[in-house]
Image (spheres, rainbow, N blue to C red):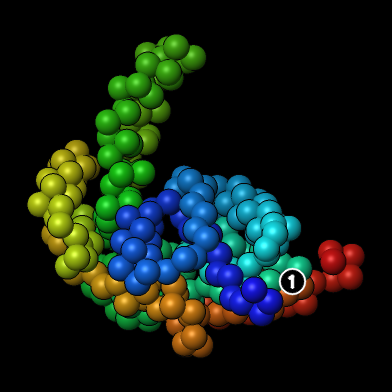
Amino acid sequence: MQGSTRIAVIACEVFRAELEFLIEKLRLSHDVHFLPQGLHDVPNKLREQLQLKINELENSSPAPTKILLCYGYCGQGLSGISSQKTPLVLPRVHDCIPLLLGLNQEQKSQIPDSERTFWMSPGWLRYSQLPFVENRQKRFQEYADKFGEDSAQYLIDMEHGWLKEYSQARLILWDQWKDSEQLYKTARFVADDAGLKLTTMSGSMSYVQALLMGAAQPDLFFQIPPQHTLELSASGVFTASPLSKKAV
């Protein structure tokens, strides 16, 4: 139908459970596309894959009238993304944790020891944290085959060493999860492996739901007009700059 609205969503796979739950609950017909969770570990790779998906959607028929990005800024992984004809909308957050908590960036930053918290959620456990623990022996063998057992053990120790920067583990639970007990058991397993005390924190669907419902709140969401590119200032302010004629 001419003039109809077609919403597309590009999301990190870490949000799969939350988005599938909300889309069913709200009876939405959004076109949702998930990208692998691990892309945020390499910001340039995330940017590349996200831009490819944006380009693909813009060239589809019918093309979306708006593209919602269920991402934080992800260590500059979204820096430089753009579209040619479709508005892009994303949350004004630096990472995914405020989205899961239902908080804005400032509220999240006020949580005591937030930056030293090893945050967990259904998606983080399923696509990152649990595989990291369960596949350790497999990674050791792969390293050993390439570099020998001594080097393999060193690499495994290095992998585990980054957890030392955290002071605690915290599982974000939405009230709507029916499998909260199993999620807690899985989180306990991961936290014990990391040597971290585990606590839980109630999350909220409000931020993710607001995104899916149109992202109309300018204090929570930032819109990138077509033929503009996203940047984040040193003070944490989102800006959209016109693409150069060469880039267009």
Hey, what amino acid is under mark 1? Lys
Q: Position of residue 108 (x, y in %)?
A: 32, 75
Q: Position of residue 124 (x, y in %)?
A: 33, 50
Is residue 39 something one can see in this rendering?
yes
Choose between 246 and 179: the one closer to the eye: 179
Q: Is residue 231 left or right of residue 214?
A: right
In the image as oriented, which residue stretches furthest toward the right?
A: 246
In the image, is residue 162 above or below residue 180? above
Q: Position of residue 65 (x, y in %)?
A: 64, 73
Choose between 117 and 74: the one closer to the eye: 74
Determine the secondary structure under disc 1.
loop
Q: Is residue 176 left or right of residue 37?
A: left
Residue identifier under label 1: 85
Residue located at (85% from left, 71% from top): 244
Residue 86, image quadrant: bottom right
In the image, is residue 214 above or below residue 153? below
Name the quadrant of the C terminus: bottom right
Name the quadrant of the N terminus: bottom right
Residue 81, image quadrant: bottom right
Q: Position of residue 67 (x, y in %)?
A: 59, 68
Residue located at (57% from left, 58% from top): 77
Residue located at (32% from left, 28% from top): 135
Choose between 63 and 178: the one closer to the eye: 63
In the image, is residue 180 above or below residue 238? above
Q: Residues within 10 Å of mark 1 (few under 14, many from 20)?
A: some
Is residue 166 something one can see in this rendering?
no
Residue located at (47% from left, 15% from top): 147
Q: How many marks?
A: 1
In the image, is residue 106 above or below residue 162? below
Choose between 59 and 224: the one closer to the eye: 59
